[in-house]
Image (cartoon, grey):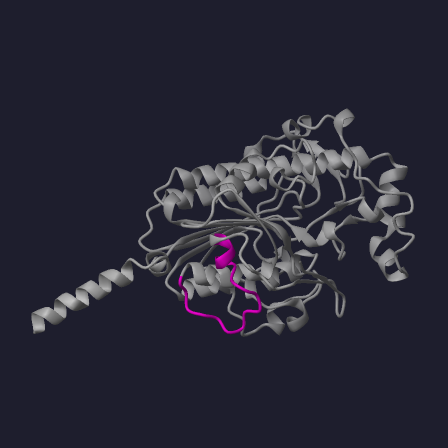
């Protein structure tokens, strides 16, 4: 009888192991987390600018699920990154702006890298993950800070202060983002005796748009296409919206100094430079022993205006500032598919918790996207909320 019981138990265990998704849920996947600063939809998979050169992001999109309607929690670096890395909305924490230290008001928050560390992962960060002013040392067992990049002689060249664009007479190897990606490639070449969480943060296309000449050469000025900005674009916008747009600020400077084409060129050049570094990093993963067992999360922390609504930079609730590129490639997930479900960067934390079978975190306010990774058209009834300052929100839904 005892032998029969052992046989029955073995059969039951084998049957459980064969259930769909069972082995994936029990497996501890590695994570490659790629954050890109100020990246809007002007990349190949999103079609925001015809003729942009982003072959490496294009290839990543072909390997994963591209979320067409993804939004940030806040259109600024600090609140967006604080929110997605703690899983807590700006309207809950009160962290709305770049000038606010976030840790004093979120003393008990367990950040995404901290939670992976607590679950036995090897964790490393390099580059801009949290907002530079408020990096969280307690979140990183190992961290490589953002290196300085070369600056062209006589800067600012065409703009004012750091609102500037120009080629630099230096090779890729001297750029800060190149050195950050070097850290990631080296990490992927190493032997790891436990699963890892590797976070790589690229600064470009954040201002100033200083990248090597060869990236500017990809976008001749006479081929630059400017955004369509109707003359009456702000006529139906209330005073509060005009105050956000600031048409008499950056936009007036751009137009009066005939810099619109050059500024767009600088932004596109910076995107292609970032794409080249992303390609190096992804090639490092593909050539490693971890390629088949790693979840890749790629996103921009918020969007960017280049004159739409006569507005530049982010800091607005319009689509250009709130919508973000967001791609996830995971073992067992759909490949080369697009999801039109309305999602938010707040969903990254719970998604990784579920994909990697980590212990749950009660404070998280987002929702796991695992069902959409399996079926990008699956039912989804969660609206996305973007917040810019206290009591100012944009809500997107289907």
Q: Quadrant of residue 83?
A: bottom right
Q: How many marks?
A: 0
Q: Is residue 244 above or below residue 172?
A: below
Query: Was residue 370 drawn as part of the magenta stretch in this picture?
Result: yes
Nearest the viewer among 312 and 212 is: 312
Q: Residue at x 47, y 53 (%)?
A: 374
Horizontal side of residue 161 vs 181, given as left or right: right
**Residue 397 pos. (x, y %):** 67, 60
Q: Is residue 277 visible?
A: no
Q: Is residue 246 above or below residue 46?
A: below
**Residue 326 pos. (x, y %):** 58, 50
Query: Was residue 51 drawn as part of the magenta stretch in this picture?
Result: no
Quarter holding the C terminus?
bottom right
- Residue segment shown in magenta: 357-373
Type of secondary structure dominating the magenta stretch: loop
Nearest the viewer among 284 and 10 is: 10
């Amino acid at each position: 009888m005892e032998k029969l019981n052992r046989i029955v138990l073995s059969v039951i265990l084998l049957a459980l192991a064969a259930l769909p998704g069972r082995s994936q849920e029990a497996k501890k996947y590695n994570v490659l987390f790629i954050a890109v600063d100020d990246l809007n939809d002007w990349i190949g998979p999103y079609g925001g600018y015809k003729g942009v050169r982003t072959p490496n992001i294009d290839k990543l999109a072909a390997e994963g699920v591209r979320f067409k309607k993804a939004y940030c929690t806040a259109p600024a670096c600090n609140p967006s990154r604080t929110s997605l890395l703690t899983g807590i909305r700006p309207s809950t924490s009160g962290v709305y702006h770049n000038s606010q230290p976030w840790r004093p008001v979120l003393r008990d928050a367990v950040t995404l890298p901290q939670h992976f560390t607590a679950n036995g992962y090897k964790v490393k960060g390099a580059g801009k993950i949290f907002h530079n002013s408020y990096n969280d040392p307690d979140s990183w067992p190992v961290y490589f800070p953002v290196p300085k990049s070369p600056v062209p002689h006589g800067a600012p060249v065409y703009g004012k202060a750091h609102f500037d664009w120009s080629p630099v007479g230096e090779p890729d190897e001297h750029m800060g983002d190149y050195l950050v990606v070097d850290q990631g490639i080296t990490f992927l070449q190493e032997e790891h005796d436990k699963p890892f969480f590797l976070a790589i943060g690229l600064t470009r296309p954040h201002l100033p748009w200083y990248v090597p000449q060869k990236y500017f050469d990809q976008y001749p000025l006479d081929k630059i296409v400017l955004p369509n900005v109707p003359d009456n674009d702000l006529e139906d916008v209330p005073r509060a919206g005009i105050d956000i747009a600031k048409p008499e600020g950056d936009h007036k400077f751009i137009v009066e100094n005939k810099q619109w084409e050059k500024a767009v060129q600088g932004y596109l050049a910076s995107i292609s430079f970032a794409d080249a570094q992303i390609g190096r990093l992804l090639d490092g993963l593909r050539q490693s022993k971890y390629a088949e067992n790693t979840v890749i999360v790629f996103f921009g922390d918020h969007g960017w205006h280049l004159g739409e609504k006569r507005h530049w930079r982010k800091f607005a609730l319009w689509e250009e500032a709130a919508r973000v590129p967001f791609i996830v490639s995971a073992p067992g997930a759909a490949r080369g598919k697009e999801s039109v479900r309305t999602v938010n960067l707040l969903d990254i934390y719970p998604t990784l918790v579920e994909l990697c079978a980590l212990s749950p975190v009660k404070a998280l306010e987002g929702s796991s996207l695992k069902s959409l990774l399996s079926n990008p058209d699956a039912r989804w009834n969660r609206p996305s909320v973007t917040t810019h300052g206290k009591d100012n929100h944009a809500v997107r839904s289907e």
